[in-house]
Image (spheres, rainbow, N blue to C red):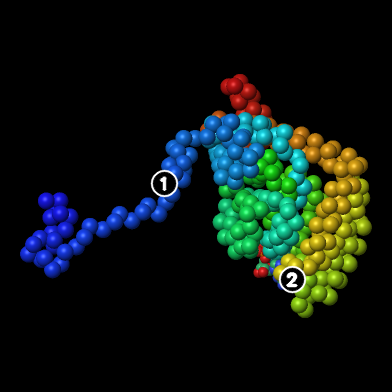
Amino acid sequence: MTREIEHPENDDRYAALAVNKGIEPPDPVNPALAARLAGLRRRPLSTGEYVAGILAGSINVLSQAITLAESARADHQERAREIINRCLPGTGNATRVGITGVPGAGKSTFIETLGKYLTARGHKLAVLAIDPSSERSGGSILGDKTRMEELARDPAAYIRPSPSAGSLGGVARKTREAMLLCEAAGFDVILVETVGVGQSEIAVHSMVDFFLLVQIAGAGDELQGIKRGVMEMADLIVVNKADGGNVERAALAGAQLQNALHLFPPHESGVEPGVITASSLERRGIEEAWARVLHHRDVTLRNGYLDRHRGEQARYWMHETINEQLRDHFYRGQRERILVAEGEVSRNEISPFDAAFRLLDGYFHDI
Ligand SMILES: Nc1nc2c(ncn2[C@@H]2O[C@H](COP(=O)(O)OP(=O)(O)OP(=O)(O)O)[C@@H](O)[C@H]2O)c(=O)[nH]1
Ligand SMILES: [Mg+2]
């Protein structure tokens, strides 16, 4: 009977066409793994499991924790704070390097080359980014996938694109939290890339030990949109793309930049900033750049600047977070009153200061 249901062609009328029952193909997915993944998806991890997973170096758990820290949901934020706090003793051991430069200067290519150099020497490297503009972040993720193709496949490297658009302060805070989580997961070098066109360099500077500016030859620095303030922050300027017919121009630009650096006051770190030429494509100058980072680390560990600077940065982030939260809370709660006041101020019916104080008084009265 069953024979007939399964294969009607096995009816005696078609005796010459006897078909045997086939074998079920094996499930292509390992059932034990599938069950574990389904379990992970269904059941949110406890805080303890997050912390244990991160400290054990699980990239999967690390990624989930960073996603939690990036979430706008208040309960996610609270959980992320708890996780970060408990991971804190495992942080602080990495060398934190910020990398900035105008779009197209070769930051991602430089990071790919430096990254491969570092992982080949046994380092574990995390690459993070700060990119507060929404349109660009899509592009950067795409760009980073192609520019850091090899590094993206390297098991000793972890590349995390910028948190999605929001206020710069918010994006930067999330990146700093991601950095701490990566350190707890055992990454000993953190590279933070940001495009050098605005305020984001300052945000990066406030979370790294060493600030590296990627320049290209052949354009005056005003053309490259690099502000004096950014040059002043740099611990090292790398004149990139010093290859092909560009070698001499790069050397000249390097010498000019070196002269320009003398105009700035000496760095508090006690290490003179320097200029080198490099080619990320031809892998030249990479070793020297890293030697500069290590030298800076050596000196600042010994003279106490590293600890002092990190303490300063931690205080900065505390105040930044207070400011951000206060601002958000105020603007969320006062939307309508602000609209009314904006109208009055535009029509010159009330002074901006008076309007501001009235709004603030109303806010403090409400809370
Ligand atoms: N000749 C030469 N070209 C390079 C070098 N480094 C990068 N490039 C090229 O410059 C272009 C931009 O490189 P990216 O690494 O994407 O530059 P970026 O600074 O990360 O750019 P954004 O992320 O868009 O700000 C690419 O076409 C690279 O191949 C180099 O050392 N020499
Ligand atoms: Mg890039």
Choose between 31 and 361: the one closer to the eye. 31
* Residue 177 appears in the rendering: no
Residue that protrudes farthest toward the left in the picture = 13
Disc 1 element: helix
Q: Which residue is mark 1?
A: 31
* Left or right of residue 15: residue 156: right
* Left or right of residue 245: residue 131: left
Quarter occupied by residue 112:
bottom right
Residue kind at label 1, given as amino acid type: Pro
Mark 2, Cα crowd under 10 Å, few <14 / some 14-19 / many 20+, is few
Q: Is mark 1 within 8 Å of ligand 2?
A: no
In x, y percent, where is residue 277?
82, 66
Q: Is mark 2 within 8 Å of ligand 1?
A: yes
Q: Is residue 237 above or below residue 30?
A: below
Q: Residue at x 80, y 36 (%)?
A: 311
In x, y percent, where is residue 140?
61, 58
In x, y percent, where is residue 210?
80, 50
- The answer to which of marks 1 and 2 sits earlier in the sequence is 1
Choose between 56 and 104: the one closer to the eye. 56
Q: Residue at x 44, y 44 (%)?
A: 32
Q: Which residue is mark 2?
A: 282
Q: Nearer the viewer, mark 1 or mark 2?
A: 1
Choose between 66 and 235: the one closer to the eye. 66
Q: Residue at x 82, y 53 (%)?
A: 293
In x, y percent, where is residue 264?
90, 53
Disc 2 element: loop
